[in-house]
Image: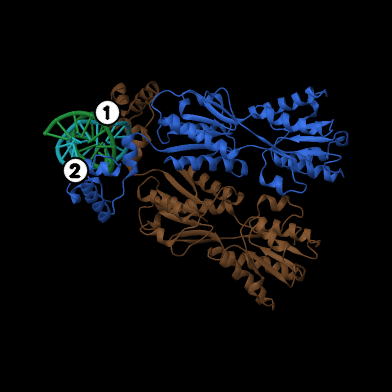
Chain colours: A brown, B blue, C cyan, D green
Amino acid sequence: MPTVKDVAKRAGVSVATVSRVLNNSEKVSEQTRQKVLKAIEELGFKPNLLARNFRKDKSNLILVILPTIANAYFARVVKGIEDTARKNGYGILLCTTQNSPEIAAEYLKLIGKKQVDGAIIASAKIEIDFCKGLDTRRIIQACEFYSFLDTSCVKIDHKKAFYDVVDYLIKKGKKNILCAIGNEDIPSEFERKEGYRKAIEENGLQFKEENVIRCSYGWTELYEKLKNFCCLKKYDAIACSSDLMAVGAIKAAKALGLKIPDEFSVTGFDNIMISRLYEPSITTIAQPMYSIGEKAAQILIDTLESPGVFEKQKIILPHELKTRESA
Amino acid sequence: MPTVKDVAKRAGVSVATVSRVLNNSEKVSEQTRQKVLKAIEELGFKPNLLARNFRKDKSNLILVILPTIANAYFARVVKGIEDTARKNGYGILLCTTQNSPEIAAEYLKLIGKKQVDGAIIASAKIEIDFCKGLDTRRIIQACEFYSFLDTSCVKIDHKKAFYDVVDYLIKKGKKNILCAIGNEDIPSEFERKEGYRKAIEENGLQFKEENVIRCSYGWTELYEKLKNFCCLKKYDAIACSSDLMAVGAIKAAKALGLKIPDEFSVTGFDNIMISRLYEPSITTIAQPMYSIGEKAAQILIDTLESPGVFEKQKIILPHELKTRESA
DNA sequence: CTGTTAGCGCCTTCAT
DNA sequence: ATGAAGGCGCTAACAG
């Protein structure tokens, strides 16, 4: 593998000049530049990024941590990040944690070791004990915000979003509305529950803790729970915290012979493909996934490249209620 | 940021010894090791991977190129790669190309520039002109194999898979079977078409080019085509090259009032989640996606780490016919 | 078992 | 506009 030295020799210039050409420095005469370019071409020289990055103390890599990509939601976020990163000359190092805080922690250490310049944590579960000594200016939280990690973040207002969808159900005449959410130790799930509560109470109905079902994001668990729910017929709607949960709810309602949406309405969350494809199609909340990724990446890159101090930002992007057949 | 030098000074040893401790070299007395560890702890020293990688001429990064991850199929492949990579101390640099050969080419150059140690091309479209001068020992093709790039590969036998599913349809009594595939310049699509042809002919039916429909992998295009297909009722089945195509076909058949599977059978490909969830659930071919990723990563890593010459391998993994309601 | 030392390839002052 | 030279942090001979 030829090095700058070889190029320099062949072009009859110094390595400094070769380096200047490589980095598009202005201060090289056109004639010299051509000589160097020719030598590079002839030698098939390729700059060694391992050396360059080391010298510049910069990896041009952004770590992206998420629970999984087997989920169209996260796939869009990643795409937003990736496109923005590429546009700015960065690559992305992918880490899917299956919500293991240990794995997230292990990868976050790469910042201190300079393997990556910064990280975007997109919904991946993290724990306070694993976040000691992290450089919070090099980290952005996306979709989800754990307040114990003092970083910038980009997300939607989950409380408002869930409020909107429950309010919509009530305006449609529903009165006994269930709520299916994930574990409340996840900030967004807690927010969503609060949105449910607010919509219920503001509309003069009564909030009951027992109407809040906790389950995983897939469709099976909620399906099983509802199918065996002795008195599902007492209720006329359910607001779910994911589109897959909504599928589970619809399957259960169908199994019990309930007409959707007249006898029983179902709403989802995230607007993944299935919510459009399913029959009935599912009323849901669309998050601007691509924009979240894009914005998160942009803030991170700006921070990394701005010399001064950047303030931590909390960006709230707008969500959208997609009304379809299920409610 | 403290360096090995600082650690050495504090521990009262040489940098070489610190380096030995860092790299778990056996040749350090337990006592010295403890001293060094203590100094590392007290100083909060973190090895600079930019420097280490440069010195070792190794990035410990594997480039993964795919058309998209907004597709459960690829997400599983990536997971297989990622898990295997992590287990072996590698990270993965993600590149989604939307099937742009230019973008793929651009990223593949990172091998020559040593930003990554090797690459796995998983189904992403590549072009011969962009593949000049690539080190084929550092590249594995997964899922798809373009023969102009002489690399190892890991995939299923697409011809056999499509043969199996069409044969299944015929055994079920279907006689006029359509075939919906993607563009034939994609090797696997060509193979699948050959599988279709073989099953038709081996069963004494007549292969007709006009029964082969070409369309994109999403559900809409095939849906539109079939809905306006004047004589869909002449046919009693369609074998599709993706599960989403199958959804489109089912939607069209339903729209024309055809009973599935009795009047019209539909099969998909890939066994993505929707094929189980959809109603009717979709008969399809399951590819061992995770294993493909896993195996591809393992071969690549073995090649990278074996000093000698590795032979190019062609690994064919088994597929599986999942019979469900749609056929 | 431990220390000394020479780079890895590149960029970047500092001269000229 | 160009060249000479130092050094980024680490590892790996080699010497002892």
User: Mark 1 or 2, which is nearer the eye?
Assistant: 2
Relative placement, left or right, of B317 versus A110 is: right
What is the quadrant of the C terminus of chain B in the image?
top right
Give the labeled residue for mark 1.
A14
B160 lies left or right of A31: right
Which residue corresponds to mark 2? B14
Numbered disc 2: secondary structure: loop
What element does badge 1 sit on?
Answer: loop
Q: Which chain carries label 1?
A: A
Disc 2: which chain? Answer: B
Which quadrant of the structure image shows residue A38?
top left
Q: Is residue B13 left or right of residue B251?
A: left
Residue visible at 36% across and 44% down?
A58
Considering depth in this image, is B56 or B87 the residue closer to the camera? B87
- The reply to whether dot 1 and dot 2 touch (C-beta < 8 Å) is no
- Whether discs 1 and 2 lie on one chain: the answer is no
Residue B209: % across, % down? 78, 25
Where is residue B292 drawn, in percent x and y? 57, 35
**Does residue A295 appear in this view?**
yes
Q: What residue type is labelled 2?
A: Ser
The residue positioned farthest toward the front in the image shown:
B30
Rendered position, A285 above or below B164: below
Comparing A79 with B312, the one in front is B312
Up-down relation of residue B247 to residue A73 (above or below): above
User: Where residue B123 sits: x, y (%)?
Assistant: 59, 34
Q: Residue B6's spot in the image, x, y percent?
A: 22, 49
